[in-house]
Amino acid sequence: MHDLSYFREHLDVFADMAKKRGIVLDLDGFRALDKERRELITSTEQLKAQRNKASDEIARLKKARENADALLAEMKQVSDRIKSADERIAQLDAKQRELLLTIPNVPPASVPVGHSAAENVEVRRWGTPPKFDFTARPHWEVGERAGILDLPASSARSQISSSMCTRASTATQKFFPLFSLTAPPCSPPANCQNLPPTFSRSRTPTSG
């Protein structure tokens, strides 16, 4: 998720990114939400400061055996306003977080602008693609037949792993750091660890 301060201060960067990606970002909605949230936080902090000051005054009045009922009643109203404001701030925080989670990353300036994978630019190749004496199946077919990918729940570019696959991946991730502490630096590159993004359902265990 993007840093809130960075996102707020670089909305023009994200607007340009959205234009190049051909997607729509509700940046005006974010501005309105952010403005309401920040103003509400400021006003709530002022109310809390007022309440704290009044608490000291109430304590002084009681110590002097003076009537503090009017101030107590006023602070009851202030406390109710603070409670209501805090609840609204929590709602705005949740909406803001949900919005930020939907914002794609900004690609480096070196990435060419295109409308599909067909416009990707090949930068370099390493090694020679292997040749088989049979028709190779794509990984998603192999994964689905093996029961380690949940394709119906996956997106076009990201596959969701099943419980079994996620457990095996997590076990490997836990083991590899221990192994790598005593192993020499990976060479050739084929011996290096590469871990692409993995998505799993909320019910899928992530630890054993």
Image: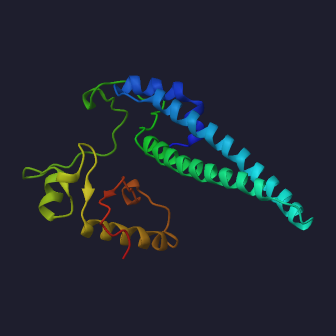
In the displayed structure, does residue 97 sit left or right of residue 10? left
The picture quadrant where one finds residue 75 is bottom right
Query: Image point 47% across, 26% down: which residue?
Result: 28
In the displayed structure, does residue 65 sit left or right of residue 26? right
Q: Colour scheme of this structure image?
A: rainbow
Residue 153 x %, y %:
21, 53
In the displayed structure, does residue 36 sit left or right of residue 103? right
Query: Image point 53% across, 24% down: which residue?
Result: 12
Q: Is residue 204 above or below residue 95?
A: below
Q: Nearer the viewer, residue 54 or 180?
A: 54
Q: Is residue 4 above or below residue 173?
A: above
Q: Is residue 64 above or below residue 133?
A: below
Tell how many labels: 0
Residue 203 x %, y %:
30, 66
Farthest residue, direction bottom: 208
Residue 47 x %, y %:
71, 47
Farthest residue, direction left: 134
Q: Is residue 1 visible?
A: no
Q: Is residue 45 visible?
A: yes
The picture quadrant where one finds residue 167 is bottom left
Q: Say which quadrant the C terminus sits in.
A: bottom left
The picture quadrant where one finds residue 142 is bottom left
Query: Image point 60% across, 31% down: which residue?
Result: 9
Farthest residue, direction right: 64
In the displayed structure, does residue 41 sit left or right of residue 94? right
Q: Nearer the viewer, residue 117 or 150?
A: 150
Residue 34 x %, y %:
55, 36
